[in-house]
């Protein structure tokens, strides 16, 4: 527990330093000639130590100063943390500034910076992965396969790479072609970087990193030069070269005139890959989430000729990953906390999400001054992650609350009646993120095949909110609250008709983007989508009318308690 508090305190300490830097940076804010560059170019300027200070203007842009130059770059929310990380490594002051006088986003970015600074300080203390953020840097990795949970297939492929790095001559002696380039592909956060580090850590060799986005999209020749110098150094000293975001530099060539420069960078990489002999104890591992975009030349024999798929973890693997992070970070988890249950409540999430969940739960506990982490800490961290942060200072009229409560009760009722395979986990009218309320269902296993009945059940569940509003308050009183429900429902219905051959008239003929059907066929398909939704909406209305009393009872209970867990809600719905 002390550890936790210490970590938080450390975060605040670093946060203060960042705040001082912010004040300094805001002072610098004077009109100067302005230049616009891309986010990745900004990162490079930053890593090269050429920037004096940075200011993040929430929702708008990043401003930077390089001598007398003022630089603008657009960014997305997810890019703030890496930026701050790099600025801290480069020793550049980072500040934030209110955009259009919107003090809330001002405070929010402030909080993000503090958290980011805390997280970075923590990783630095451990000498962990993020300590090295320069372009094409060498580091020693202390990560091993013991830090990886799940990903069984990928890990066993990579073990072979480790044995090559440890005794390359053995492979060469028997004429075995040693692995040269390995492509890890899969969604973000599934542990690709982690495993590449583990290869270097296990083999006890240097780890060289470069990211595709750091060597593309700017100044002539620089990308190719960086690649060349990285490979030269690695060839001399041996080790694992890790190329992250390979797609950024290895996309199919010649697609568009303006990317000639990127083609040169890619060509340089191909030259380097071909220049290895078995005597160089070097293995190149690349990662991408878009293998289909890669130039075919990259995948030829002797280059990235081995692909290893890294998928999202299954429910059992999610449990292992949670357990690993709880142990590794020595989170004092209460004995009653069931990680298997928690894993089931996190469908379709990555290892990074799960690591984050463990961290968030610890933060929730620390905030409450708790000595151990219990189920309610874990659950509230999960809700924050999956459903968004609770909104404070949010005011709705009492009539609005009534509508929200009945709307959510409608989803719950329809889900329980028509989609029994997904148990109801909780219903709440606590506003979070964009939503004023949520009825949350948790599939109890990883489902791969969906029956027509299941998909129709999903549509019915989605229509439950609108149907409840219509039955209880009248057709002219239905609200905008069903917006995202209707989007979701339409998407499922389109998928069923367009791609799954579950329509009546279009039958098993499906939509093919490479040979798009005639306008008439499309119109027919759209009609079917519409008819399917209409038919199910009638079913939803009937269900609500039939069970109106229990629905209202659940709505009333929500108005009184705000949140009900699945069992409580179920008890009201099934009298
Ligand atoms: P990727 O490179 O695939 O986007 P990362 O390797 O950067 O993903 O994963 C980010 C973090 O998420 C890791 O540092 C680790 O803490 C956690 N993580 C992801 N996958 C796993 C896993 N299979 N086992 C343990 N931790 C994982
Ligand atoms: Mg990565
Ligand atoms: Zn809804």
Image (cartoon, grey):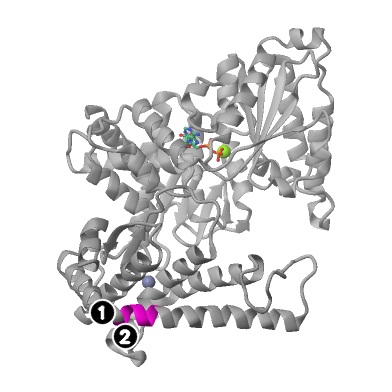
For the residues labelled 1 and 2, say whether their Cβ atoms are less than 8 Å apart: yes
Name the foreground residue: 26 vs 290. Answer: 290
Residue designated by label 2: 471
In the image, is the residue at mark 1 within 8 Å of ligand 3 by its beta carbon?
no
Q: Is residue 286 left or right of residue 538?
A: right
Report which quarter residue 468 is drawn in.
bottom left
Q: Is residue 253 visible?
A: yes
Query: From what the image shows, is residue 159 above or below residue 8?
Result: above
Name the foreground residue: 308 vs 39. Answer: 308
Q: Which callout, 1 or 2, points to the residue nearer the camera?
A: 1
Q: Is mark 1 on a helix, strand or loop?
A: helix
Q: Magenta residues, as a range?
A: 540-545
Name the residue: 50% across, 83% down. 534
Q: Is mark 2 on a helix, strand or loop?
A: helix
Name the residue: 59% across, 20% down. 200
Residue designated by label 1: 548
Name the foreground residue: 227 vs 368. Answer: 368
Q: Position of residue 456 (x, y in %)?
A: 49, 69
Q: Is residue 328 left or right of residue 531?
A: left
Magenta stretch prevailing secondary structure: helix
The crowding category of the residue bearing disc 1, from other C-alpha atoms within 10 Å (few below 14, some 14 to 19, many at least 20), is: some
Q: In this view, does 58 lie to the left or right of 306?
A: left
């Amino acid at each position: 527990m002390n550890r936790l508090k210490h970590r938080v305190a450390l975060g605040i300490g670093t946060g203060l330093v960042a705040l001082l830097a912010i004040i300094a940076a805001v002072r610098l804010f004077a009109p100067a000639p302005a230049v616009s560059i891309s986010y990745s170019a900004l990162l490079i300027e930053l890593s090269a130590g050429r920037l004096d200070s940075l200011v993040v203007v929430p929702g708008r842009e990043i401003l930077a100063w390089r001598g007398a130059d003022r630089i603008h770059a657009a960014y997305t929310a997810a890019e703030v943390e890496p930026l701050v990380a790099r600025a801290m490594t480069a020793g550049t002051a980072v500040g934030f500034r209110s955009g259009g006088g919107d003090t809330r986003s001002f405070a929010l970015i402030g909080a993000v910076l503090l958290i980011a600074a805390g997280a970075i300080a923590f990783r630095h203390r451990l000498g962990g992965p993020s300590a090295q953020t320069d372009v094409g840097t060498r580091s020693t990795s202390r990560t091993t396969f013991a830090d990886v949970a799940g990903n069984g297939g990928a890990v066993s492929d990579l073990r072979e790479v480790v044995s090559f790095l440890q005794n390359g001559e053995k492979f060469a002696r028997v004429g075995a072609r040693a692995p040269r380039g390995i492509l890890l592909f899969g969604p973000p956060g599934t542990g690709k970087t982690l495993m590449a580090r583990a290869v270097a850590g296990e083999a006890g060799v240097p780890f060289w990193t470069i990211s595709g986005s750091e060597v593309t999209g700017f100044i002539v020749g620089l990308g190719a030069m960086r690649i060349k110098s990285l490979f030269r150094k690695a060839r001399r000293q041996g080790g694992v070269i890790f190329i992250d975001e390979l797609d950024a530099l290895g996309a199919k060539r010649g697609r568009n005139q303006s990317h000639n420069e990127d083609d040169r960078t890619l060509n340089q990489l191909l030259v380097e890959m071909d220049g290895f002999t078995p005597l160089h104890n070097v293995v190149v591992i690349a990662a991408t989430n878009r293998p289909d975009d890669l130039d075919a030349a990259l995948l030829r024999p002797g280059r990235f000729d081995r692909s290893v798929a890294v998928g999202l973890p299954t429910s059992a693997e999610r449990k292992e990953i949670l357990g690993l992070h709880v142990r590794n970070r020595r989170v004092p988890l209460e004995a009653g906390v069931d990680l298997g249950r928690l894993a089931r409540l996190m469908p379709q999430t990555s290892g990074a999400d799960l690591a984050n969940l463990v961290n968030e739960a610890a933060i929730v506990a620390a905030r409450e001054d708790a000595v151990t982490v219990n189920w309610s800490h874990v659950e509230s961290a999960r809700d924050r992650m999956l459903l968004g942060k609770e909104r404070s200072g949010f005011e709705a009229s009492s009539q609005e609350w009534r509508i929200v409560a009945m709307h959510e009760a409608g989803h719950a009722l329809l889900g329980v009646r028509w989609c029994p395979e997904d148990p109801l986990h909780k219903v709440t009218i606590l506003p979070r993120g964009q939503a004023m309320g949520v009825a949350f269902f948790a599939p109890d296993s990883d489902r791969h095949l969906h029956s027509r009945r299941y998909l129709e059940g999903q549509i019915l569940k989605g229509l439950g909110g609108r149907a409840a509003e219509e039955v209880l308050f009248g057709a002219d009183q239905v609200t905008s609250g069903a917006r995202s429900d209707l989007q979701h429902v339409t998407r499922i219905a389109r998928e069923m008709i367009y791609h799954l051959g579950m329509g009546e008239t279009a039958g098993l003929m499906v939509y093919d983007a490479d040979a798009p059907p005639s306008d008439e066929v499309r119109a027919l398909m759209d009609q079917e989508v519409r008819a399917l939704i209409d038919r199910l909406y009638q079913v939803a209305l009937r269900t609500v009318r039939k069970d109106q009393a229990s629905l209202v009872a659940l709505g009333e209970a929500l108005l009184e308690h705000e949140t009900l867990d699945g069992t409580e809600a179920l008890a009201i719905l099934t009298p």
